[in-house]
Amino acid sequence: MKQTQRLLEIMARLRDPECGCPWDRQQTFKSIAPYTVEEAYEVADAIERGDLGALREELGDLLLQVVYHTRMAEEEGCFAFEDVAQVIGDKLVARHPHVFGGAEIRTAEQQTHDWEQRKAGERAAREQDGALDGVPAALPALTRAEKLQKRAARVGFDWGELKPVFAKIREELQELEREIGQGEAHARVEDEMGDVLFAVANLARKLAVDPEQALRGTNRKFERRFRHMEKRLREQGRRPEEVSLEEMDKYWDEAKREGL
């Protein structure tokens, strides 16, 4: 708590209207929000890499974002860091009556069900009546698609098996191909492309696969193999733009065989 208090005091000094940092003083909730999102991704990246040293540092950067936002809110007389800590503390206690109360929950599945029930109750208390209310619009698109689909599934808007999900993906791919073949406007192609991605996100949900995590993994794999290809060509004094696709594919396949 001593270090937490020190951090809060540092932020207050940085935001001091007379002797603070000019850059920090001019920031707003809106201007800081992109940094908050970026730091959350940095935390996820450190976890993916298994780098606990980097994770400690990135968690500090993410904590700074919380301190920054709460300091600005305190300056406006809205709330302070302690209020934020109290809200999340109260929420955790309320959502875990089997730990902090007399309720009994025997399985993780039951706990998840009860958790969702309580969250639904909280949304109702905030007068969010729709099943899709409260899904943040600023989430990454794949993550938001998955969350929207989960919400819809809770009220029965969902397929019970995988077969129609695969059929939907094929249908959306055919529609995208048709729009491209007919030379439709870019907006129409973009719309159909979105439908394809939404259908694929639905398949990921049905398979209990996090689409964002799956795509991050594929991005890393693509990067490893592409760098291997560049390295092999560099050893010959050549660059990718100087060779044919077939030759690049040869080194790409080599990377696959090496498990990259």
Image (cartoon, helix red, strand yellow):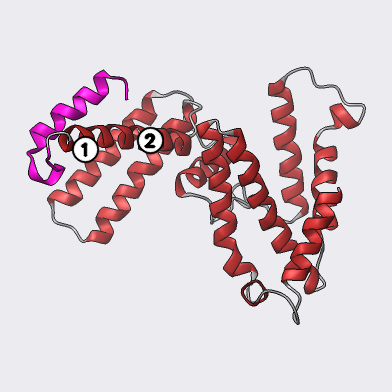
The residue type indicated by label 1 comes to Glu
Q: Where 98 falls versus 136 (above or below)?
A: above
Looking at this view, is 211 or 156 the one in front?
Answer: 211
Cα gap from disc 2 to disc 1, whole angstroms: 15 Å
- Secondary element at image label 2: helix
The local crowd at label 1, few if under 14, some if 14 to 19, many if 20 or more residues have their Cα within 10 Å, is some
Q: Which residues are magenta?
A: 237-260
Residue 152 visible in image: no
Circle number at residue 220: 2
Observer-side mark, 2 or 1, equals: 1
Amino acid carrying label 2: it is: Arg
Q: Position of residue 69 (x, y in %)?
A: 70, 63
Asked if residue 248 is among those painted magenta in the image, a careful observer would answer: yes
First-in-chain label (2 vs 1): 2
Q: Residue at x 72, y 49 (%)?
A: 123
Horizontal and vertical percent position of residue 251: 17, 28
- Using residue 106 as the reference point, say whether residue 216 is left or right of it: left
User: 197 or 82: nearer the eye?
Assistant: 82
Q: Residue at x 79, y 73 (%)?
A: 75
